[in-house]
Image (cartoon, coloured by chain):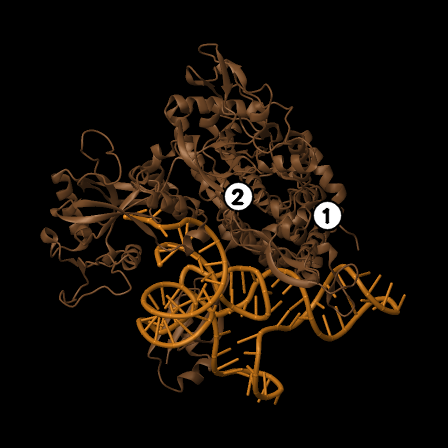
Chain colours: A brown, B orange
RNA sequence: GCGGGCGUGGCGGAAUGGUAGACGCGGCAGACUCAAAAUCUGUUGUCCGUAAGGACGUGGAGGUUCAAGUCCUCUCGCCCGCACCA
């Protein structure tokens, strides 16, 4: 039995595609374009099969759209800056650049072996000065436009590593690598003013109709719009135990944000964030308060800590005046649960109608004043127990608001605040500006200079790019740019006095926020040309992991708007279509002593149980996302060596719907391999000798051949529809059905029927074309075997003839009282009366009717006849 | 707590309200073989029945409908995202 020799064919076709520059594209005005993009990878090392699922999907779409005649841009590049390179440099005594370049070379070779149709002439790497120099120019433009600025912000500081840590790098309040307790520090950091576009970013989500609903919701929640009011509470009397804040005797009122201005009459306290400037000020004269604030700042910000931390507060001794009633006073507290970063860093507490406020009030024995009455409740009887009442109702105990429903009361209270000059209705957002400073080496240098006299001075454009020095040491903790003996010392471009470079580098999300634009004109002297961007953008189909649902995708949306404001392009949304693919999973294995084992270290013993190389039993764990740490990975090279790229590709596409997780199994890949060989045999040794290409079909076909032809056109129609809708697994099922139909064509029909060879040729050619986007090498090889002209990759996508695809005969289900009792065969579109009488004449039906006339008969054309006995 | 998703054979999964289980994996039986691998053929939701046939069946309970995996109400379980957001 001959086997498909993928080793020979795959490298051969890859060479031919490369030599003919098949996938290198140029903008062609007037020709419809299709920009297919998969999220560019971080070059972390070798790829495993889990890494290439989204590239396989992207390649399918790229080749499919290409066959449909689109000018398809399908580029690939490297998100090449980042922390792992520095960690590797420390661990392996290499240089981040060397390590990164090696990984890029390895991974590029692996992607090439998969036969992906990339335009490699557009390859970019974020760590290349050719790339990040443009990024520095963008930063300076943002700076000039007020979209980049320097601010003090609280950060996680690792005192051992001497660096800022991202939230993800803080584990249980400690630095993930040093184990040191992380401190909160107020540092001057560069930030991007994403909040300048908050409302736009939120509103435009509604127009992203080819994005997953889930991702749109996540972005909406992340932006977190809340309608409410800012309210001013005057402080009664002078500040105790502290000098007055400013001016002569008059103390600034406390401004709070609330969404429940309707419940202001239920206020029983105000609470300030520990980092509120009034709290900080008061702490100067109040050692108890100072100690409380210090303790709050020591508590980590990790979610686990927040969840378990109880609500605690510290009295300030201040009293605030109720905005609606000058005679009413409420105490001012500092509370650990009030965030400085949201709203105004101060709240008013209404325990009756907010669960968190209620817990606080119970703990500190503050009054609980209900002001919203549930529908039908008795105002005399209604009281708050352990749960705050947060539903709708009617206001009471609230003077001029009494009797109003909640929504109405919000409006009236807001108007009153505005009339009194004690507040205004406003909108608060969860979204905060994006801090982009990192105290890291392997990133894009921020192109500014700090001068003692001139302050912050941008690096002059003609001096860009500011390149990273290569001679750096990772022996000392902290930022190597800061330790470098010479790099940071420069003359101030303005006064020419001695000055220092900024040693922070940009967050790597900055790099990935515009790479899709660079791909449009990757060799341009500017970041990207307006012409190229206006032809290729937006990305028609973007594919990536859902883990980027908020950060990368939101930053890129922001960047596109920021670049538009700076005159770079005329576009709001970068990604017209988005698809988030599921993960590739694999069973996990552990040894008796608990170490993770690679799948190839596990063998099946004679008795059928799983053992390791030394014959010791293996503990089988749950199936989880492939990850190096759990060793449940299957190397890409090993799979391509054993089964070839096409087999791997088809498996990644066929076994699960693309948005769901896929389990990688040995039996699964072997099943695909069998199918690959069946396909190859069909094309290379067809059951009857084929006529030359283009041989016309006979006018009339025998029923079996007619059926085959119909199956082919049905498959073409179904596969096309499935690919349009990203139902790859179903498309493959359809192709397999068609394959079965070809193989099952009865032998006598083949041998004796003069029409058979031509019908078979049509079927096999269609098969090769349909397989092209999924298994491009095999499809080319089939095309060659069939004697097709040119490359399959240049063939147009087949078009189904609806007339040929329509079944001549239909099977009609016969139901009695909703249960299937029989089926009937009829020519398509037989009129209802004939079907009804045929159904009523069936013995299976007569038995259930028991001699009575049916009460009702419903005939659905070509589908079902439903009889009610 | 808030938001979202998903529950269908042994497994992955198909089903514009119209024959539930397409397609595949695995299993079982058989052919070829000295044997194995490979390949091929048949079969494969559960239960009753020799069979014809029948009953049951899409997490659970109701409902709408001639007809429900699909629509509605309630409920259970799992997964994901956000989370002291005022």
* Residue A487 % position (x, y): 58, 20
In the picture, residue A272 is in which quadrant?
top left
On residue A31, which mark appears?
none
Determine if marks 1 and 2 fall on one subunit.
yes
Which image quarter holds the C terminus of chain A? bottom left
Horizontal placement of A403 versus A489: left or right? left
In the picture, residue A85 is in which quadrant?
top right
Which residue lies at the image location 42% right of the left edge and 22% below the top edge? A141
* Residue A544 % position (x, y): 52, 43
Residues at discs 1 and 2 in contact (Cβ within 8 Å)? no
Crowd band around label 2 with a 10 angstrom C-alpha radius: few (<14), some (14–19), many (20+)? some
Label 2 SS: helix
* Residue A685 % position (x, y): 74, 51
Question: A353 and A281: which one is in front?
Answer: A281
The residue tagged 1 is A638
| First in sequence: mark 1 vs mark 2 | 2
Horizontal placement of A684 versus A768: left or right? right
Question: A180 and A4: which one is in front?
Answer: A180
Chain letter belonging to callout 2: A
On residue A169, which mark appears?
2
Chain letter belonging to callout 1: A
Horizontal placement of B30 versus A373: left or right? right
Question: B56 and A358: which one is in front?
Answer: A358
* Residue A260 % position (x, y): 23, 50
In three-dimensional space, the C-alpha distance between marks 1 and 2, rounded to whole angstroms, equals 33 Å
Which image quarter holds the N terminus of chain A? bottom right
Q: Is residue A325 above or below residue B33?
A: above
């Amino acid at each position: 039995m001959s086997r498909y020799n993928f080793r020979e064919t795959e490298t051969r076709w890859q060479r031919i595609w490369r030599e003919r520059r098949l996938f290198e594209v140029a903008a062609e005005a007037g020709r419809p374009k299709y920009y297919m993009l998969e999220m560019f990878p971080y070059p972390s090392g070798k790829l495993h099969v889990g890494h290439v699922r989204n590239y396989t999907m992207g390649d399918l779409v790229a080749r499919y759209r290409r066959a449909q005649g689109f000018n398809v841009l399908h580029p690939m590049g490297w998100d090449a800056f980042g922390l792992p390179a520095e960690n590797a440099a420390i661990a392996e005594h290499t240089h981040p650049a060397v390590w990164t370049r090696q990984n890029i070379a390895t991974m590029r070779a692996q992607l090439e072996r998969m036969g992906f149709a990339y335009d490699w002439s557009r390859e970019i790497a974020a760590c290349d000065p050719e790339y990040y120099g443009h990024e520095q120019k963008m930063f300076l433009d943002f700076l000039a436009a007020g979209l980049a600025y320097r601010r003090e912000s609280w950060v996680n500081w690792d005192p051992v590593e001497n660096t800022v840590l991202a939230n993800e790098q803080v584990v249980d309040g400690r630095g993930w690598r040093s184990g040191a307790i992380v401190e909160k520090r107020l540092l001057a950091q560069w930030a991007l003013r994403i909040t300048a576009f908050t409302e736009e970013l939120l509103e435009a989500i509604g127009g992203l109709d080819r994005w997953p609903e889930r991702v749109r919701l996540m972005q909406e929640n992340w932006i977190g719009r809340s309608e409410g009011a800012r309210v001013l509470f005057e402080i009664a009397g002078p500040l105790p135990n502290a000098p007055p804040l400013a001016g002569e005797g008059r103390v600034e009122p406390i401004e709070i944000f609330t969404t429940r201005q309707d419940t202001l009459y239920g206020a029983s306290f105000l609470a300030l964030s520990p980092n509120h400037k009034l709290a900080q000020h008061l702490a100067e004269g109040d050692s108890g308060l100072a100690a409380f604030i210090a303790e709050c700042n020591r508590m980590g910000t990790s979610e686990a800590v927040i969840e378990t931390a109880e609500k605690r507060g510290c009295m300030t001794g201040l009293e605030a005046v109720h905005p609606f009633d000058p005679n009413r006073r409420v105490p001012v507290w500092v509370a650990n649960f009030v965030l400085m970063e949201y709203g105004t860093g101060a709240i008013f507490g209404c325990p009756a109608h907010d669960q968190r406020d209620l817990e606080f009030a119970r703990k500190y024995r503050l009054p609980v004043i209900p002001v919203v009455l549930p529908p039908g409740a008795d105002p005399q009887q209604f009281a708050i127990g352990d749960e705050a009442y947060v539903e709708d109702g009617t206001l009471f105990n609230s003077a001029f608001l009494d009797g109003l429903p909640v929504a109405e009361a919000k409006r009236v209270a807001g108007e009153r605040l505005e009339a009194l000059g004690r507040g205004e209705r406003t909108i608060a957002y969860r979204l905060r500006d994006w801090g982009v400073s990192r105290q890291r080496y392997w990133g894009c240098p921020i192109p500014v200079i700090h001068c003692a006299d001139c302050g912050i001075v941008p690096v002059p454009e003609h001096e860009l790019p500011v390149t990273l020095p290569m001679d750096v040491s990772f022996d000392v903790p902290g930022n190597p740019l800061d330790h470098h003996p010479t790099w940071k010392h420069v003359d101030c471009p303005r006064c020419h006095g001695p000055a220092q470079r900024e040693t922070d580098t940009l967050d790597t999300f900055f790099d990935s926020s515009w790479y899709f634009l660079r791909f449009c004109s990757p060799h341009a002297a500017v970041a990207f040309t307006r012409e190229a961007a206006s032809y290729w953008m937006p990305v028609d189909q973007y594919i990536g992991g859902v883990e980027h649902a908020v950060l990368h995708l939101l930053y890129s949306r922001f960047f596109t708007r920021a670049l538009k404001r700076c005159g770079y392009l005329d576009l709001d949304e970068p990604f017209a279509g988005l698809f988030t693919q599921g993960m590739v999973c694999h069973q996990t294995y552990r040894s008796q002593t608990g170490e993770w084992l690679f799948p190839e270290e596990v063998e099946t013993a004679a008795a059928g149980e799983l053992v390791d190389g030394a014959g010791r039993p293996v503990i089988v764990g749950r199936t989880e996302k492939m990850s190096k740490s759990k060793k449940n990975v299957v190397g890409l090279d090993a799979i391509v060596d054993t089964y070839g790229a096409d087999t791997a590709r088809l498996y990644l596409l066929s076994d699960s719907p693309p948005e769901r997780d896929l389990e990688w199994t040995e039996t699964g890949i072997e099943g695909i391999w069998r199918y690959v060989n069946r396909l190859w045999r069909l094309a290379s040794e067809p059951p009857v000798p084929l006529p030359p290409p283009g041989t016309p079909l006979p006018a009339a076909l025998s029923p079996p051949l007619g059926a085959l032809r119909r199956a082919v056109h049905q498959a073409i129609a179904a596969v096309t529809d499935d690919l349009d809708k990203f139902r790859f697994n179903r498309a493959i099922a359809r192709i397999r059905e068609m394959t079965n139909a070809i193989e099952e064509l009865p032998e006598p029909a083949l041998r004796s029927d003069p029409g058979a060879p031509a019908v078979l040729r049509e079927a096999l050619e269609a098969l090769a074309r349909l397989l092209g986007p999924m298994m491009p090498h095999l499809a080319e090889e089939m095309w060659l075997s069939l004697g097709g002209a040119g490359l399959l990759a240049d063939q147009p996508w087949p078009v189904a003839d609806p007339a040929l695809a329509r079944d001549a005969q239909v099977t009609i289900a016969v139901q009695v009282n909703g249960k299937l009792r029989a089926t009937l065969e009829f020519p398509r579109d037989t009129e209802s009366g004939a079907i009804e009488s045929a159904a009523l004449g069936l013995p299976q039906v007569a038995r259930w009717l028991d001699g009575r006339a049916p009460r009702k008969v419903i005939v659905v054309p070509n589908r079902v006849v439903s009889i009610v006995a």
